[in-house]
Image (cartoon, grey):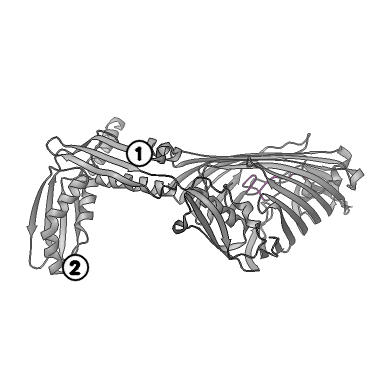
Amino acid sequence: MRSLFVPTLFLRFLIIGLSFSAFSASANKWLEVKITGADSALTLNINAHLGELPTSDVQRRAFIFNADDNIDAAMHSLGYYHAKIEQHLDNPENAPWQLTITVTPGEPTRIQWFDIQLLGEIRDDIAVKRWLSNLSIKPGDVLNHGRYEEIKSQLLTLALARGYFDGSYSKNNIVINRDLNTAQINLHYDSGQRYHIGSVHFEGHSLQAGFLDGLIPFESGSRYSTSKLGSLNRELVDTGYFNNIKVLPQLDKIDGKEVPIKVELTPRASHSIELGLGADIGNSTDSRIEPRVRVTWRTPQINSYGHSQESTIEWSPNRPKFLTTYTIPLTHPLDDQLKIRLGLLRDKYGVNQVYDPDKRDYLNTDELDTIKETFGVVRQKRLDNHWVLTYSLDALNESYTQSDIDYDPSFLILGSSLSKTHRGDNSLDPKSGFFQYYSIEYADPNAGSHVRLTRLQAKFKWIDTFFEKHRFVSRLDLGANLAAEADLANIPPSLRYFAGGDQSIRGYGYQELGPYIDYVNSDNQLARMVVGGRYLMVGSVEYQYYLTPTWRLATFVDAGNAFDVDQLEPIVSVGGGVHWISPIGPIKFDIGVGLNETETVDRSWRIHLTMGAEL
């Protein structure tokens, strides 16, 4: 029975496919048109040349009268010069007229040769050579006038984008031999000279003279290309100073071979306020809902030196935060910046539990609660090889209670990081890319820190897309705190390692996973507290399948944990989701399911709604 089922199913699909390609119909109350004998491409082209169906008696007669010429044009444009067309018209009195078109395409005209010749400076242009190598048209292909016009247009567009403003076709035609069903295509293009980029003039800003010159990513006199002007536009956008940017080549003011560039700028408003509302669902051992209100105040340009600031106040019952950053451009508006940071925030980590003798189990009570004050200075430099180098000095004071003991350590942390992001394209949802990040931080009692600490971190993310629809995303996060065993309790929770959350192990709550300690609390109860670990190792592999260019399905596996040398409990979660590639970046709805339970956390599932680019 099984051996008969498969061929039967195949035959059924084959019959459906043949009937679809051999018959097409469209109708309204004035006219019904049926096309038979043509494949789907020819049918689509015939319908396009016939145009909209008539909506009056006069239009109907004109439609039928012109049908022969329009069908011929449709056949010729796809290389069929010997087609036979038969029309049959039924004109009932009280029903739409019926026009039946039977097409016998005949042998198509095929390309005998495709002669494309480039004269002038464009012959040595690498971008044009790359375009030529990617042309898919070749001898033996069925002639397609639309493809010919497309190639003509592409070459003209590319030439203008590369600065060949005097270029023109010296010969562009198709020679048809109807007896032999062959076509000879000739495209001869003379580009003339290539123009260069001249001086760049900025208008409409209040910054210091010459301040924006550092953003120009090309030398004056370099060869013209619109991609260079696009790079300048992106640099100006990244400053955040401007609401509207127009980079305009002034072709009417060409001086010799140089095209002057005018940049029209419209500054952003002096201040902007952004309001955000949301809610956090507690960790997997706590189902409370915690509302959040966030207000962000930005001043994109404080003075003529390009200083800016961003301040955020976030209120929630258990995690209020205040953060402000003041940015000062140094030797370059974007590539060299000094950032001064100030923050006051309360945060929660892990989970606290007490033992219930009646239930013979540990019950959750609260979390490890901290209040952190921080002040820091960071210099961030973007190097010529696209690496981003930072070095920083941060003062930190953090108050917390661990094992019923109050701690209030202070640290002065010297740090440096190196990172690089490579994107396969400039979209918010790149098809490929690689991110790498390395950092080292050091605190010493001789420099005002409570204990000696060396903190190491490395992060990696890899993205690639195969066969257009199959996208893979993987990440790996590593961390290590090097400190004496006796000093571990004096390392603040914000400097320890925890796991869990949408950027870690999905299926578990944010920062609820990690090593724990047992102790007897002040009420003489057995208690347990997740305090975080000295080390972190978390990895993820995710497969994404594009249903459409803007919708995809995802499935993932996350694994790892925060741990100490003597307390490693690997955690694994699996799940899937639906992602919408919105104009402002991917919006992801994922569900993660934990496969493990630990001494402090049961198996759980979590819903994660996130937005933002992955690189």
Give the vertical position of 257 relative to 434 (above or below): below
Residue type at the position of mark 1: Leu
Q: Where is mark 1, residue-wise?
A: 118
The kind of secondary structure element at disc 2 is loop
The region drawn magenta spans: 496-509
> Looking at this rendering, what residue extends furthest in the front direction?
256
Q: What residue lies at 22% left-to-right and 37% top-to-bottom?
A: 184
| Residue annotated with mark 2 | 55
Give x and y (percent) for residue 55: 19, 68
Circle 2: residue type: Thr
Please identify the residue farthest to the right as the structure is shown: 446
Please check the rendered image and state whether residue 357 is part of the magenta-colored stretch, yes or no.
Answer: no
Observer-nearest residue: 19 or 566?
Answer: 19
Q: Quadrant of the N terminus?
A: top left
Label 1 to label 2: alpha-carbon separation: 49 Å
Picture coordinates of residue 602 (x, y %)?
Answer: 67, 46
Identify the image quadrant of residue 60. Answer: bottom left
Q: Outermost residue toward the top? A: 3
Element type at marker 1? strand
Do we see residue 557 in this rendering?
yes
Q: Main secondary structure of the magenta part?
A: loop
Seen at 56% across and 49% down, the residue is 220
In reply to whether residue 501 is colored magenta, the answer given is yes
